[in-house]
Amino acid sequence: MQRFSFLSLARNALSHHEGWRRAWRSPPLREAYDVVIVGAGGHGLSTAYHLAKEHGISNVAVIEKGWLGGGNTARNTHTIRANFLRDVSIRFHDVSVKLYEQLSRELNYNILFSQRSMIDLIQSWGKLRDLRRRSLAMALHGPAYDLISVDELRRRIPAMGDLSGVRLPPLAGMAHPQAAMARHDAVAWSYARAADARGVEIHQHTEVTGFLRDARGRITGVETSRGTVRAGQVALATAGNTSHVAAKAGLSLPLVTRNLQAFVSEPVKPIIDVIVNCPDVGLYVMQSDKGELVIGGGTDPIPSYRQGCHVATFEDVVASLVELFPRFKALRMMRQWGGAIEFAYDASPIISKTGVEGLLVSTGWYGGFKSIPVGGLTYAHLIATGTPHPLAEAFGLDRFTGLRFLLEAGTVAQR
Amino acid sequence: MLQISCPWCGTRPEGEFICLGEAVPPRPDPAALSEAEWAAALANRANIRGLHAERWWHVRSCGRILTIWRDTVSHAIVPPPDGTAALEVKP
């Protein structure tokens, strides 16, 4: 791997930056691998990296129907946080935040990590009780989630308008200082580069069309648009489309896919330096490094793979935005997009073996950008050792049998 | 915004309804199933990418529940391919 450093930048500047090598190879597709990971997004690439790094398994192919990092990794709002309700979720995402803090150094790639806090605006007594409960649950595990006054809210978010006239005046706020943003493409690219350097092969534009099975029904490989590939294990990391791909192996999962949309305004001068989240009205807003306001809300309330704009939700979000930030009325929106995210029946992630031998799933990521490092770490552990990582023991599919649901309130599903 | 045909009220905007999700078969008798089968019946969904049947509750009007066929990629609502009319389902 060609390392980035001040020296290498200076050296390449002398040759007009024409001497940089490709960050990862595009080798020919081989006939067999120890592990095939389906989906070269953040989770798939992070899993491949950890398989090679911690478990010495580098005979791995990551296959991707589109381009690297072009699915939900490119369609989220790059927020990283650990303010969850369940003990296992808090511990899991706390580790993820800590891994993110070190990621640029570990992968020798600047992911533009910016730990700028998330401020929740609380506009109902029910939500205040709910978030206080989350705050107390989090106090047991480390990440901070502190109650702040309305005066402090005004001080931290000066862009807010006069609050006296809003329909639900803010009652208080919650501050989560560990929350951060990072450049989403850089996360995918840095993992791809680091995994490739450890021998992992990445195959883009290679769509899985079916599964190979032996006489006992065990999965022994995949049929792809570029030929048949045999594999010791097949691990799905196909955010949004996991039900669709798993159905080809006859597997049914407790998932529903929905559209989560976001949009960005034209760029303006710095005006918001925290991530503002308003769970009562379904709105969040932050400002990107380019100056654009990144705005989103809740998921569209219907099953959908469209990755588009659901007008009813769009109107809701914009109405909430201009009520709390009247000065943003003058902004023009530049881009809008949607990501197909899948919810498990209990809104917690699934990192698990399945009823089909040789096939594993990592799914249920309600906005899984925040969990890319720890998702890969724990999924790689499961693939390599056959047993769940201690951080992810609760995320098995077996929790549904026996109805041991892990109902999570810290997700975008909660509104 | 989707325009949904309610058999009782005519074509109405989506905002009058709440989507109840994929139309799942009636609940089986849990006593007749294993734990795994019961969990699957309760939680698993086909989650089809394409045409599927789903239930909508006309909560801000007649209050009834109906079934429509909608493509989850294009969001186009089409006549039921099996020829059935939009059914009322008791909540």
Image (tube, coloured by chain):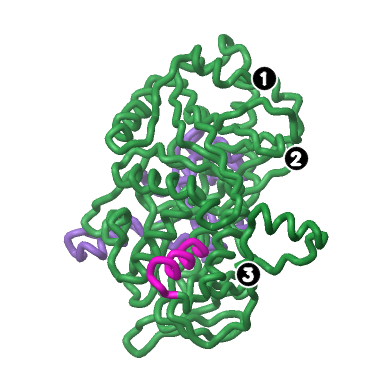
Chain colours: A green, B purple
| Precedes in sequence: disc 3 or disc 2 | 3
**Local secondary structure at mark 3:** loop
Q: Main secondary structure of the magenta part?
A: helix
Q: Is residue B81 visible?
A: no
Q: Return the residue nearer the eye: A41 or A58.
A: A58
Letter of the chain that mark 2 sits on in the rendering:
A
Instruction: Name the amino acid, label 2.
Output: Met
The image's mark for residue A24 is 3
* Closer to the eye: label 3 or 2: 3
* Closer to the eye: label 1 or 3: 3
- Left or right, residue A394 beside residue A178: left
Residue that sits furthest to the right in the current view: A16
Is A249 drawn above or below residue A17 in the view shown? below
Residue A246 image position (x, y, % from top left)? 45, 69
Which residue is under mark 1?
A326
Mark 2 Cα-neighbour bin, 10 Å: few <14, some 14–19, many ≥20 = few
Q: Residue at x 44, y 51 (%)?
A: A343
Q: CA distance from mark 1 to mark 3?
A: 46 Å
Quadrant in which the N terminus of chain A is drawn: bottom right
Instruction: Specify the quadrant of the image occupied by residue A332.
Output: top right
Residue A208 image position (x, y, % from top left)? 54, 75
Which residue is under mark 2?
A334
Residue B27 image position (x, y, % from top left)? 30, 56
Query: Can marks 3 and 2 be said to lie on one chain?
Result: yes
Instruction: Name the amino acid, label 3.
Output: Trp
The residue segment tinted magenta is A44-57
Q: Residue at x 49, y 61 (%)?
A: A46
Instruction: Specify the quadrant of the image occupied by residue A402.
Output: bottom left
| Precedes in sequence: disc 1 or disc 3 | 3
